Image: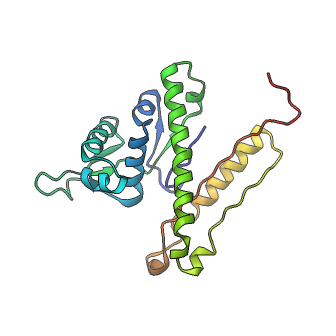
Amino acid sequence: MPETPDTPEAAEPNVRHLDPRSLRGLAHPLRMRLLNALRHHGPATASQLADRLGESSGATSYHLRQLASHGFVADDPERGRGRERWWKAADYGVMVDDTLQFDASPEVRGALNTYMHEVASIHGQEVSTWLGTAHEWPRDWATKADFSDFTLRLTPELMAELDGRVHDLIASYADRATPESAEDVAQVRIHLHAFPQKKLNTPDA
């Protein structure tokens, strides 16, 4: 069950594969939001992250230290001044290995459930934010956003093939926006969900 990293793995090799311990360390809503904020917006202090996320600096400080103990974030000493501690993301993204889905440990299964539901929640929040602010963007951007969905009949192998080809295509665009085009460049989020649906004529088990 791969989770698409923030930067495609083919373009940025610094993608971490989660094991049971690191999954349990990351599977917390605030920790995931903190890590996303550092990846999307760059290094920050606990106080800055608290203001951005509407949390207390005590809570962000605690969970940043927990993320650091699992290697997800690290100090950014180049930005620190005096007692001010800056944090940065240690990876560009994470991948959930398929084996975790079938781990018999209740702790791992619970952590995976928390993690995946929070990923879905973050995606939903990002879409809602765009819908609420689309009118603030220039027409050229506002008319290019895409909210498509598709239903295909596939085997597991074909679904994996399609998913891999889409990942490769996304990765091929990682370096297309050059410094010369910086005036019209924005950070673009792409969500990819692929999952089977229960057949209507299949009885409950």
State which quadrant residue 72 falls in. Answer: top left
Percent x, y for residue 116? 55, 39
Quadrant in the picture for the N terminus:
top right
Residue depicted at x 32% and y 48%: 55
Residue depicted at x 39% and y 43%: 30
Q: Nearer the viewer, residue 163 or 62?
A: 62
Indicate the colouring scheme.
Answer: rainbow
Percent x, y for residue 131? 57, 65
Q: Is residue 91 visible?
A: no
Q: Residue furthest left?
A: 82
Quadrant in the picture for the C terminus:
top right
Residue depicted at x 55% and y 39%: 117
Q: Nearer the viewer, residue 75 or 116?
A: 116
* Left or right of 57 on screen, residue 117: right
Instruction: Give the vertical position of 40 relative to 17 (above or below).
Output: below
Percent x, y for residue 107? 48, 22
* Left or right of 194 on screen, residue 29: left
Instruction: Give the vertical position of 157 relative to 111 (above or below).
Output: below
Percent x, y for residue 3? 56, 44
Q: Is residue 31 visible?
A: yes
Q: Nearer the viewer, residue 165 or 30?
A: 30
Q: Nearer the viewer, residue 205 or 164?
A: 205
